Amino acid sequence: MGRDQGHRGKVPEIRTDQDTITFVLTITVREGTTAKLVLRCDRDGGIQASIRPASLGDPD
């Protein structure tokens, strides 16, 4: 049987440039409050993670 498509997680926004790839995912930090989890992977293997406030007007 195939996977239940109704219960999949959210897909992150993916940004790329010559030196990095960045994944941005909206997460719930408290009921009714969201933030952006940002993971940036550098070409040299370094990884940076941060949690940023969601912008006003974000649908999540």
Image (spheres, grey):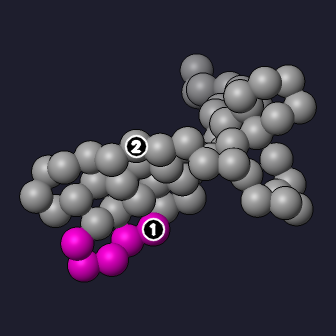
Kindly indicate the quadrant of the structure image that contains residue 34. top right
Residue drawn at (33%, 77%), measured in percent from left and top?
17
Quadrant where the image shows the N terminus: top right
x 48%, y 61%: residue: 14
Q: Is residue 51 visible?
A: yes
The spot of residue 23 in percent (x, y) is 46, 53
Q: Do callouts 2 and 1 mark residues in contact (Cβ within 8 Å)?
A: no
Label 2 sits on a secondary structure element that is strand
Packing grade of label 1 (10 A; few <14, some 14-19, many >=20) is few
Q: Amino acid at mark 2?
A: Ala
Residue at position x 86%, y 54% in the image: 59
Does the image show residue 5? no
Does the magenta segment cover residue 45?
A: no
Task: Give, as a three-letter code, the residue at label 1.
Answer: Arg
Q: Is residue 60 above or below residue 18?
A: above
Seen in the image, is 48 located left or right of residue 3?
left
Rendered position, 55 above or below 39: below
Q: Residue at x 82, y 47 (%)?
A: 60
Per the image, label 1 sits on a secondary structure element best described as: strand
Counting labels gives 2
Residue 30 pos. (x, y %): 78, 24
Q: In the image, residue 56 lies at what x, y percent?
A: 84, 60
Magenta stretch, residue numbers: 15-19
Q: Distance from label 2 to label 1 (Cα)? A: 14 Å
The residue carrying mark 2 is 49
Query: Circle 1 is placed at which residue position?
Result: 15
Res. 10 image quadrant: top right
